[in-house]
Image (cartoon, rainbow, N blue to C red):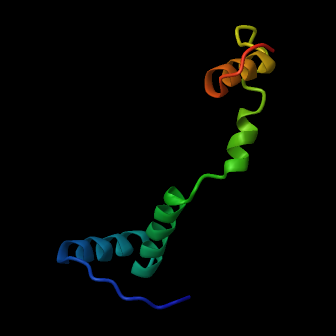
């Protein structure tokens, strides 16, 4: 562990001290837990897990054009190509 110093308002300090007494945990434990929750919420999403959850999402759709059709349309619009 690394020792660090923080500044709290009087109200924050009193609340933390009271919570430590109520829970039987140290103020340091409470602060570390709060920091852990903050970091977990701010962590970048696991992109691979998100992609895996979306796999097959549109597999049974019948209202979507085929990939080749989409490519021809894209080429026509963006590259000025015609035909197919």
Q: Which residue occupies 81% across, 15% down?
A: 84
Is residue 55 visible to us here?
yes
Q: Which residue occupies 19% across, 72% down?
A: 11
| Position of residue 63 measured from the top left corner of the image (x, y, whole percent) | 70, 8
**Residue lying farthest to the left in this orientation:** 10
Q: Quadrant of residue 52?
A: top right
| Position of residue 71 measured from the top left corner of the image (x, y, whole percent) | 74, 23
Is residue 24 visible to us here?
no
On-image quarter of the N terminus: bottom right
10 sits left or right of 73 in the view: left
Q: Which residue occupies 72% across, 16% down?
A: 82
| Position of residue 5 measured from the top left corner of the image (x, y, whole percent) | 36, 88
27 sits left or right of 84 in the view: left
15 sits left or right of 24 in the view: left
- Against 75, residue 21 (above or below) is below
**Residue lying farthest to the bottom in this orientation:** 3
| Position of residue 3 measured from the top left corner of the image (x, y, whole percent) | 46, 91
66 or 25, which lies in front? 66
**Residue lying farthest to the top in this orientation:** 63
55 sits left or right of 21 in the view: right
75 or 65, which lies in front? 75
Q: Quadrant of residue 21?
A: bottom left
Q: Which residue occupies 60% across, 52% down?
A: 45
How many circles with numbers are drawn on the protein?
0
- Against 81, residue 64 (above or below) is above
- Against 66, residue 57 (above or below) is below
31 or 69, which lies in front? 69
- Against 69, residue 45 (above or below) is below
């Amino acid at each position: 562990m690394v020792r660090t110093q923080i500044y709290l308002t009087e109200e924050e300090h009193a609340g933390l001290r009271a919570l430590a007494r109520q829970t039987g945990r140290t103020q340091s434990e409470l602060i570390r837990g709060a920091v852990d929750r903050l970091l977990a919420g701010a962590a970048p999403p696991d992109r691979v897990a998100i992609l895996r959850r979306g796999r097959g999402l549109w597999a049974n759709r019948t209202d979507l054009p085929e990939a080749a059709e989409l490519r021809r349309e894209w080429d026509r619009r963006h590259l000025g190509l015609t035909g197919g």
